[in-house]
Image (cartoon, rainbow, N blue to C red):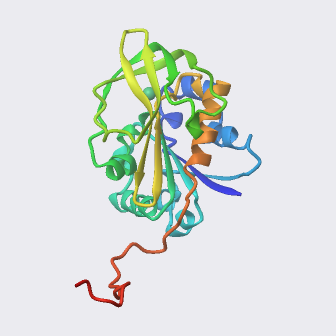
């Protein structure tokens, strides 16, 4: 089984204007994401939100998490530094991190990547998500492109480290392009950022977008999970002197 924790700040769903979000995500964005992953019977999914003690991300929860999926937007700064650092440490030790849409500015992602992750944006556009690495595990079963009739424009320059795999690039009707599906490795952990998922848009109901998120979680599974990261002193491997 793949143990997944879906984290959503779950703030806009309870604020003024929430109706537009709840129409698309009746149980909150975390419940929509949980539903996407539950289509795969190999996934064991729990959800966590900002309002829970320790944001629902205790050491115990993270120890029991293979892949953490993150959605946040208006409350990045309400995630305590201590929790963000805890997530970072777990990623470095092997936990996968899948950051979605406005999680580009989340504390866990910016700390793991080490750049500002700033970009340009505009609500209410049309998007075409191009698959630019069709052999990548995250692109399996995904067509040459995915059309999203309504999605928020995210544009370059996107201040990220050069992706290790560029899996998707999105085009927007305003003429912009954006590196919308990117992977990195950090320590023993695998990280994927994926742009679609503006809170009032239907992108998470698109079957191809759902498949990308499922593939991403599978891809981000830990290969090795370290208990600690340290610098052990070691004895020489070779007995003979180099002379
Ligand atoms: Zn958005």
Give percent across and percent down for residue 44. 70, 54
Q: Tally the numbered discs.
A: 0
Can the viewer see residue 29?
no
Image-based side of 211 in relation to 55, left or right: right
Image-based side of 42 in relation to 121, left or right: right
Observer-nearest of 45 and 58: 45
Can the viewer see residue 62?
yes
**Quick check: which quadrant has ligand 1?**
top left
Which residue is found at the position 55% from the left and 58% from the top?
A: 222
Image-based side of 179 in relation to 44, left or right: left
- Image quadrant in which the C terminus is located: bottom left
Give percent across and percent down for residue 30. 59, 42
Which residue is found at the position 43% from the left and 74% from the top?
A: 228
* Rendering quarter of residue 232: bottom left
Which residue is found at the position 41% from the left and 18% from the top?
A: 123
- Against 242, is 118 above or below? above
* Rendering quarter of residue 76: top left
Residue at the farthest right position: 41
């Amino acid at each position: 089984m793949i143990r997944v924790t879906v984290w959503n700040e779950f703030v806009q769903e309870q604020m003024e204007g929430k109706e537009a979000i709840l129409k698309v995500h009746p149980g909150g964005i975390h419940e929509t994401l949980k539903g996407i992953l539950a289509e795969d019977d190999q996934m064991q999914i729990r959800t966590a939100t900002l309002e829970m003690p320790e944001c629902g991300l205790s050491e115990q929860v993270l120890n029991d998490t293979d892949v953490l999926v993150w959605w946040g937007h208006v409350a990045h700064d309400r995630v305590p530094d201590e929790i963000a650092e805890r997530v970072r440490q777990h990623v470095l030790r092997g936990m996968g991190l899948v950051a979605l849409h406005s999680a580009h500015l989340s504390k866990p992602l910016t700390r793991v990547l080490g750049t500002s992750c700033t970009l340009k944006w505009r609500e209410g556009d049309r998007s075409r998500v191009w698959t630019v690495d069709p052999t990548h595990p995250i692109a399996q079963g995904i067509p040459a492109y995915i059309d999203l009739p309504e999605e928020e424009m995210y544009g370059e320059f996107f201040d990220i480290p050069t992706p290790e795999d560029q899996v998707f690039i999105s085009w927007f009707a305003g003429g912009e392009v954006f590196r919308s599906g990117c992977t990195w490795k950090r320590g023993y952990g695998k990280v994927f950022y994926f742009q679609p998922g503006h809170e009032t848009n239907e992108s998470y109901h698109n079957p191809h977008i759902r498949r990308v998120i499922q593939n991403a979680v599978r891809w981000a599974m830990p290969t090795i999970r370290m208990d600690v990261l340290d610098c052990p002193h070691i004895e020489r491997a070779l007995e003979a002197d180099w002379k």
